[in-house]
Image (cartoon, grey):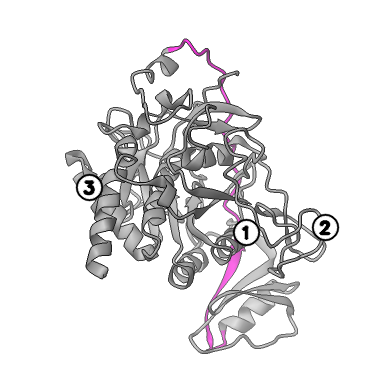
Amino acid sequence: MKKLSICFLMSFTAVIATAEAAGSRFHPNNLFVKMKSGQHLAKSQAMKSVKKIIGGLYLVKTNKLEALKKELSSDSSVEYVQNDFYAEKAAMPKLEVLEVSTLAMKRFTEFNFVSFNDPDASKLWAFNSTAGMNVSDAYDIISTSQSEPVIVAVVDTGVDHNHEDLKDIMWKNEKEIPRNGIDDDNNGYIDDIHGINTLVRDSKGRATMNTMASHWHGTHVSGTIAATQNNGIGIAGVASNVKIMAIRTVPDDKDELDSDIVEAYKYAAENGARVINCSFGKEVNEGGMVVRDVINEIGKKYNTLVIASAGNDSMGPWSWHNNDSSPKYPASFDSETLLVIASTTSSGSLSTFSNIGINTVDVAAPGSNIYSTINGGKYGMASGTSMASPNTSGVAAMVLGQFPNLTAKELKAVLMKSVTPVAAFKSQIASGGRVNMQNALKKAAALNRISK
């Protein structure tokens, strides 16, 4: 099998404009409206259609955007009105073909995990106990046969669900009959077998069902979380109990809409995802709280934890990008059900590209030189907090599988309080350490005993 290595530092979208700058792009016909508690959205002639998102939040279609915005802004029952902003376009990374004999590949042969028969498991340095997440040792203290299945939604560029290491771990909507053109389960989507595609909509504006990857990024993320273990093929994912729900929401130019993001989150939570991996983001929030409010609502209503990458804007060790003072979104939203991840290297140090933030970045996890699945049945290496996030999502899913009664808040606390402490991290991230799967399982077990 041909091997690829990806040289990738997926930087968040760079936008020169400030939060309220007039140059920020938004959808000309979409308007978010959040009502105050107990209030209901009144009808208006300027409204073409109204779709309730969650709680008191609505997405309104209109051909008179500014007039409707002015009308609703003067309504005392409205908490806020917000445009539907784009993330701004940016180039996606490209693949770089390297020979297997290069140092970039040879350096991983020292990690020989007897726990897995997958031939390239030796490249998964994130599994070790010295600088990784202690994944291999964690499997010695749990019974995977007793682990509850956990749905993890990958909100990304889509997933190659025909990949040899992913085809058996894809989530399937059992209530939906494939390719019959009918919304069999009445959830508002037709033929959503593996998830939805918010980038392509039908004549009624509904997200469609083609979740196949357009770019390798979502496939790489998915393999890190849950590539089939012990199938004698390729690699092993962190988690053995995961079904990947594919949600294609990030375009190949990274120009995702806020409305697509919140629909993806809502769909994932309503259809059973307890963890949502969010390896994307943008630099400007334009003052809006829509994405944050949806994260809060799905955390409260469905106990869904959103795990997000911190961003890759640093030039360490000389200059660290601090999300506390220069926010990234959704990473910098204040939410009890959002876990934000920095990236570490195989030596255990913070990756030089990784953003930090003692208040806004929660834990660190392996993100440099992560080997995983990519489109077309291939495998490759990538670096970025985009890779640290799915490593953490895999750990989160394993903890949930053993202790399914954990709330989203409790799961976040378990992951933060069970880290491997790293002295240098104390002034850089909230937990002061790196995700540790074995410790997390022990911490969750202790919490479970106390709650009984």
User: Magenta span covers which residues?
Assistant: 74-102
On the question of residue 309 being in view, the answer is no
On the question of residue 41 being in view, the answer is yes
Q: Position of residue 329 (x, y in %)?
A: 46, 55
Q: Which quarter of the picture shows residue 29? A: bottom right
Compared to 17, does 271 lie above or below? below
**Residue visible at 31% across and 39% down in the picture:** 140
Q: Position of residue 256 (x, y in %)?
A: 61, 52
Residue denoted by label 1: 260
Crowding around mark 2 (Cα neighbors within 10 Å: few <14, some 14 to 19, many 20+) is few
Is-magenta flag for residue 26?
Answer: no
Is-magenta flag for residue 99?
Answer: yes
Residue denoted by label 3: 432
Q: Amino acid at mark 3?
A: Gly
Q: Position of residue 33 (x, y in %)?
A: 58, 76
Residue denoted by label 2: 180
Disc 3 to disc 1, C-alpha distance: 33 Å
Q: Spot the residue most to the left.
A: 423
Disc 2 to disc 3, C-alpha distance: 51 Å
Q: How many marks?
A: 3
Q: Spot the residue most to the top.
A: 101
Query: From the image, which quarter does the N terminus lie in?
Result: top right
Q: Amino acid at mark 1?
A: Asp
